[in-house]
Image: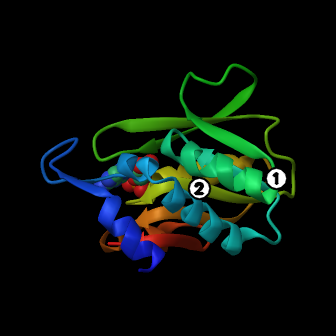
Amino acid sequence: MSLSQDLDTVIRNVPDFPKPGIQFKDITPLFAHPNLIERVIEDFVNQYKDGVDVIVGVESRGFLFGVPLALKLGIPFVLARKAGKLPADKISHTYDLEYGTATLEMHSDSIQAGQRVVIIDDLLATGGTARATASLVQELGGTVASFAFVIALDFLKGAETLPAPSYSILHY
Ligand code: AMP
């Protein structure tokens, strides 16, 4: 079976989490299948083996895929974290959620001007989280080359709102 078909069989759909009406795509069962994780990372490696300087992972599930990808590519990994977690000099970006706001932060010295960046997270929904991360990367002088997701919820049309192309393995 294809990688996306195999992923579909292990990703757990949890209705009404964290609130009514949301179909939560739970990636935790994937981590019981090392061979499948390896295929996910290899798929991203094939996509990004040329011309990328830095991988930026979005807290926290973006870290799970971003670190092995950066290791395989032999390039730096940078953390985009929720507010109040990063200890050193940092920049912040606050964005709107359905109810309220959220803030992401990156260390000021984590991206060098002109670096080409891939932003990675487990899932693309409305795109708000990815756009906020892109704003941070751009404020630090980086160029967002692409966004990478294991899963994209295409019916929410988040990809159309992103400032660079995106690549997702499994589409719903
Ligand atoms: P968004 O900013 O709307 O694109 O939402 C993306 C972020 O929220 C990612 O970090 C996802 O992990 C999480 N997320 C949003 N919707 C879901 C969903 N249906 N299932 C799992 N995670 C989700």
Q: Nearer the viewer, residue 116 or 76?
A: 76
Residue 125: x percent and y percent?
Answer: 38, 60
Q: Residues within 10 Å of mark 2 (few under 14, many from 20)?
A: many
Decide which of tag 1 and tag 2 comes sooner along the chain: 1
Furthest residue in direction bottom, as rendered = 1
Residue 118, how many percent across, how many down? 68, 60
Q: Residue at x 79, y 39 (%)?
A: 110
Graded by Cα atoms within 10 Å as few (under 14), some (14 to 19) or many (20 or more), the crowding at tag 1 reads some
Query: Quarter-wise, where is residue 13 in the image?
Result: bottom left
Image quarter of residue 90: top right
> Which residue, given by chain and number where applicable, does mark 1 sit on?
75
Any mark on residue 120, and which?
Answer: 2
Q: Is residue 138 visible?
A: no
Above or below, comparing residue 71 to residue 109 in the picture = below
Q: Do the numbered discs 1 and 2 sit on residues whose CB atoms are within 8 Å?
A: no
Give the residue displayed 65% in from the left and 39% down from the top. Answer: 79
Q: Nearer the viewer, mark 1 or mark 2?
A: 1
